[in-house]
Amino acid sequence: VVLLKAMIPLALGCASHAADDVSQAGMEFVSAYINSLKRADRVTADEIQNLTPILGVLERKLMFDANFDFETPSEAEEVFLDLRKQLLIIFKNITRLEPDVSLQFVSSRFSQLLDKGGAEGCCSANIPFYETEGVLTMLYEPG
């Protein structure tokens, strides 16, 4: 258990890496960690506390690149789309495990976007599309 706690920051560092292959390896550990929590008899406060940083990494990794070609995705963009599917599964598992933590995280991020957009809200030119889309996806995906 102590080793697992020590590995969370390392796994999140790998999971948040810019290279999708490195990120994917880190996310495999994160996914296994979330699955182990789902099987546990009870989730401790420390384990619940680990979920918010995981959600932060998921949000950043879910975001499309500003130059993403939606019409004809390249091979690298196809890899990203596959990774994104895996990230959304992890997000849904966290939401099923601790819905209040997910709701609080998404609500906070949505409020930050609205504040950043001022009177125009999420549709403001001050907010890149990929930020708004990432948060809206997290709002929509749990169902």
Image (tube, helix red, strand yellow):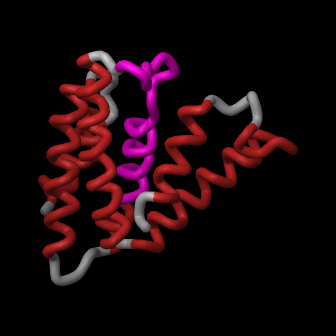
Q: Is residue 67 magenta?
A: yes
Q: Looking at the image, which residue is at 63% across and 53% down? A: 110
Give the quadrant of the N terminus. bottom left
* Image quarter of residue 65: top left
Q: Quadrant of residue 93?
A: bottom left
Q: Position of residue 12 (x, y in %)?
A: 29, 41
From the viewer's perspective, tell me whether residue 142 is left or right of residue 105.
left
Camera-side residue of 12 and 105? 105
Left or right: residue 61 compared with residue 126: left
Q: Residue at x 87, y 44 (%)?
A: 119
Is residue 79 located in the magenta-colored stretch of the structure? no
Task: Judge whether 106 appears above or below 78 on screen.
Answer: below
Q: Quadrant of residue 9?
A: top left
Tally of numbered discs? 0
Residue occupying the point 31% across, 23% down: 77
Residue furthest front as drawn: 71
Magenta stretch: give its range. 50-72
Name the residue at 23% across, 81% down.
42
In the rendered structure, the answer to whether residue 121 lies left or right of residue 28 reads: right
- The one nearer the camera, 59 or 17, is 59
- Toward the right, the furthest residue is 119
7 on left or right of 130: left
- What x and y, as percent, mark residue 62? 40, 39
- Residue 3 in percent (x, y) is at 12, 53
Image x and y of residue 138, in percent: 47, 54
